[in-house]
Every structure is written in structure tokens, then in C-alpha cells.
Image (cartoon, rainbow, N blue to C red):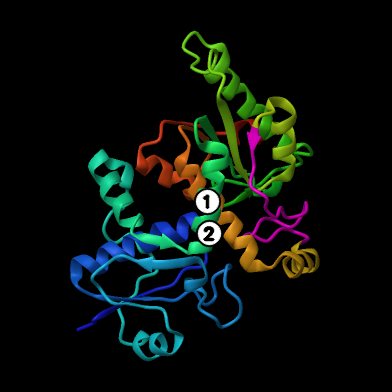
Amino acid sequence: MNNYYYFSRDTGWGDTLWHLTNALMYCEQNNKGMLVDMRGHWASKGDSNLFAEYFHHIDTDIEVIINEEYIDQLKKDAEQHSDSRLVIKNPLKSKEESKKFYDAFDRISVHGTIAKEIDEMREKYFSGNYVVGVHARTSNGEVLPPKTGNSNRFQGERNAIQTIFDIYKEKIDHILFDSPRAFLKSCDNYKFFVATDSKQFVDFFEKEYGNTIVTERYFAPPGCGTGHEKGEQSTEIQTEMEEKYGRINIAKEALVDFYLLQYTNFLFKNFSRFNEFCLYKGIPNFHINFQEKCY
């Protein structure tokens, strides 16, 4: 009988935490210990399991092992699956499922230094304001969300980020300011929190709207993809930038954005698990599909 479940994944934070949450629920339901192995994850370095660099604690009665030596001893006899949709395949199926999933996720505590930065940002910018979250995953203008399961590139789209921003602007203006039911028409204390992988998108947004909150973070140069996706020109430039900023710092900055989105009052979003946790929490949102206009 397998007494442990082996968890390992090399994807962005949203997808990694989505599958880790499912694995946690599965282990609790089946009374299994969990081997959490981040070696090989884009946010780790070499053969080091850097789970403890990003997360402080998992509040659970099951045994959670992150020590590499113990993982290697137990891994061969542990249960493991390539797909960790073990308990809840679609948390948005019902409010009950969403709450159950988010409550489990909420027991994975982020590292103290990251939590401190999140709290400071909330106190400085979020407190007393109506905060509109804007999450735009553009993959630095190189890769669009999947159409049919495969990542697709902009085909000859020279102004990809401008195109994406214009689509967001159209929806934001209509919903927040122009329509008869626009709820920011008479609101003086609103701010936008923008979480994106594109510095160009941030520049467009700040020029258009002003009162914008953006964390101090690394943005990959054009042609280099994003933190966990490699672009066409990624190798040399990406390595140079990672050495300058530090891969761990880049990953921590992304986590700060990930958690701050969950404290917004309304969210404009596109396809990404990075923002799905806001939906599980019940934050009102509007989904923007920019694929059709960009292809």
C-alpha cells in the first residue's frame, strides 16, 4: 500500500498551486503523506527543493515532506499522477466546490517575507480604496492563451500589446465609466491594481488611467517570454536578466502579484490559472477574450 503521494510540477504559480491544492485534498481524504518536490520547477535552482523559500507552512494533519533526501528514499514507492485533478476537477462547478477548494488552498501559507510585502502593499494602496484588479497575461506579446490546447503565437501582429490593451480599455471604460450601470462614475477613491507580464501593457495603462498600483517587479525583455515561459530570444538575454535580478526574486515578485489580486474588489481577467483563485474566492469579475481580435 502506498502511504505517500509524490507531487512535482514545473508550471506557473497559478497552475502549480492549483494542482498542489488538489493533491493536498486528495492526501487528506486518503490519509496519505505528501512529498512536495520543487526540484526542476522554474522557480527553483538546480537540484534544490526551494518550497520553503516561498511557503512557510501547510496547515494539515497529514505528513508533508520537503527534504530532498527523504523524498528520494520514499518516492519510488509513492503514488503519483501526471495530472493532479484528483478531488475537484472544476472548482467553479458550484459555490460549495469553490469554497471547499479555496479553503484548502488558504491553508498553504506563503513565506513570511512575501506575506510582509503583501500586507505592506495592502495597507499602503488598498486600504480605504475600491481596488479594481486587472490581470493581463500576454506572455510578453509572444504567446496567446490556448485555443484548442496548444499555445499559439501572434501571427504577424506587430503591435500585439497595444491590441490587447485596447481590448481591455474598451471593456473597462464601458463597465466602469460609460454604461448606465457603471459603478465608478461617482467613486473618488478607486485604484487599479495591474498584474501583468508586460511592461508595455503597464505603460499603456498608466498613461491612460493614472491612479494605478503596480508592484516593483522584473519584466522580461521583448523576445524572452515570461518568467516560466521561454521566448524566441530567451537563452542569452534571459540568463543575463535572471543573473541580474535573481530567479528567486523574480518568482517571489510573481507570488506577490498572485496574492494581491485576491484582495481586489472587482477583476478584469483573461485566461490564466493565475487569476482563477480570485473566482474561487468569489470576487466579481469580467472575462476578456482577446484571441479573436488578435488572430
Compared across the picture, whether 47 is left or right of 139 comes to: left
Say above or below: 68 vs 276.
below
Location of residue 239 by image quarter:
bottom right
Look at 61% across and 29% down and name the residue there. Answer: 168
Q: Which mark is residue 205?
A: none
Say above or below: 250 vs 175.
below
* Image coords of residue 97 (percent x, y): 25, 46
- Identity of the residue furthest to the top in this view: 180
Label 2, label 1: how many angstroms apart (C-alpha)? Answer: 6 Å
Q: Are marks 2 and 1 in contact (CB under 8 Å)?
A: yes
User: In the image shown, does 80 or 47 lie closer to the viewer?
Assistant: 47
Span shown in magenta: 212-233
* Image coords of residue 35 (percent x, y): 36, 77
Density class for disc 2 (Cα within 10 Å; few <14, some 14-19, many ≥20) is some
Q: Which mark is residue 114?
A: 2
Q: Amino acid at mark 1?
A: Ile
- The quadrant of the rendering that contains the N terminus is bottom left
Look at 60% across and 19% down and name the residue there. Answer: 173
* Image coords of residue 255 (percent x, y): 54, 56
Inspect the magenta stretch and tell me whether residue 22 lies in it: no
- Which element carries disc 2, helix, strand or loop? helix
- Which element carries disc 1, helix, strand or loop? helix
**Circle 1 is placed at which residue position?**
118
